[in-house]
Image (cartoon, helix red, strand yellow):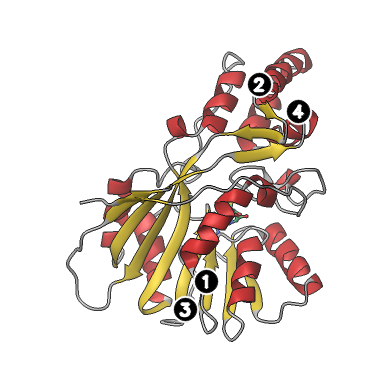
Amino acid sequence: MVRVMEADHQHTVEPGSLAGPAGRPGPATANRLGSVDYDAELRLHNEVLRRACGIRRHDHVLDVGCGTGQTTREAARMATAGSALGVDLSAQMIDRAREIAQAEGLRNVTFERADAQVHRFPPKHFDLTISRFGTMFFDDPVAAFANIGRALRPAGRLVMLVWQDHERNEWDVAIHRSLEGFGDAVAVAPEGQNPFSLANPTTVEGILDAAGWVDVTFTDVHEPVYYGPDVAAALDWVRGFTCTNDVLKRLDPLAADRALERLRETLAAHARRDGIWFDSRAWIVTARRRRTGHGSSASSCTSQT
Ligand SMILES: C[S@@+](CC[C@H](N)C(=O)[O-])C[C@H]1O[C@@H](n2cnc3c(N)ncnc32)[C@H](O)[C@@H]1O
């Protein structure tokens, strides 16, 4: 049985910090200065994730696919007598994450460039693994979650944010629609690059069960994503997404202009007084590392209020 729970809404966003992970914006646009970035885009999601993580003072936290490390730094700030390690495939992200952590004077946070699927983490070391949209891209999810599990103490916890289906994510539907008709425009994501690969609770439950996790829960997170204070900033942000950029660079200049105009209209249609917003749906997935032996246990889903 799959349990779904509810989480809460809050609607304040302060765009402005630095970020821009792969999987959404491509590395070429990552970490630039601008009026919006990935941390700003996900501000509301981040608040939900922070509450779900419930990090304690002595916790040792592993942040998988940490990007430029906002969630890792926040974990380190909460685990004042513990530590936080952020790992990411991208050397560029890790360099930036280190720079920011150093500038902020954080001493209990470290970052490593690593493939979380195969990296040799210290065994049974961490109390908690967290991830903000960094776990959907494994080639072999069962191997990856098993590897991560081995790094956790018995009964250690997993708390991760993953997208629900494409159809439930207005941002993705709208971008795809805007680019429809422009050649083979919206390419199918290459294998291992599908941001919606953990959208299905039954699939995720199966993966986690096979990887040695129990007590799997799914909390429906219904928060909008923020694309910037105005259409120009939002267009600048969205054209840096890998999926958008891949299409634009294959078009001749005239067609690219038309595609951008279509995107601009879509963004304008989502303008509010406080900026450009798109609806989105995600899951907070939680689980515990199985203590001994095997055997599945019930999972659950709830949703936000
Ligand atoms: C959508 S981004 C999220 C980044 C970060 N968690 C954040 O919220 O800012 C996904 C990140 O996962 C990383 N990633 C993908 N596969 C990975 C793997 N096997 N091991 C470590 N990191 C991975 C990517 O490099 C990318 O930075």
> Looking at numbered disc 1 in the image, what kind of residue is underneath it?
Leu
| Location of mark 3 (residue) | 126
Ligand 1 contact, mark 4 (Cβ < 8 Å)? no
Q: Position of residue 219 (x, y in %)?
A: 39, 52
| 227 lies left or right of 186 | right
**Marked residue nearer the N-terminal end (4 or 2):** 4
| Location of mark 1 (residue) | 62
| Location of mark 4 (residue) | 231
Ligand 1 contact, mark 1 (Cβ < 8 Å)? no
> Looking at numbered disc 2 in the image, what kind of residue is underneath it?
Ala
Image: 240 above or below 159: above
Considering depth in this image, is 141 or 172 the residue closer to the camera? 172
Disc 2 packing (10 Å; few <14; some 14–19; many ≥20): few
Q: Position of residue 256 (x, y in %)?
A: 73, 19
Question: Which of labels 4 and 3 is toward the front?
Answer: 4
| 24 lies left or right of 239 | left
Circle 1/circle 3 CB separation < 8 Å? yes
The disc placed on residue 269 is 2
Question: Of helix, strand and loop, which one carries label 1?
Answer: strand
The CA span between labels 2 and 1 is 39 Å
Question: Of helix, strand and loop, which one carries label 3?
Answer: strand
The CA span between labels 4 and 3 is 43 Å
Disc 1 packing (10 Å; few <14; some 14–19; many ≥20): many
Disc 3 packing (10 Å; few <14; some 14–19; many ≥20): many
Image: 48 above or below 11: below
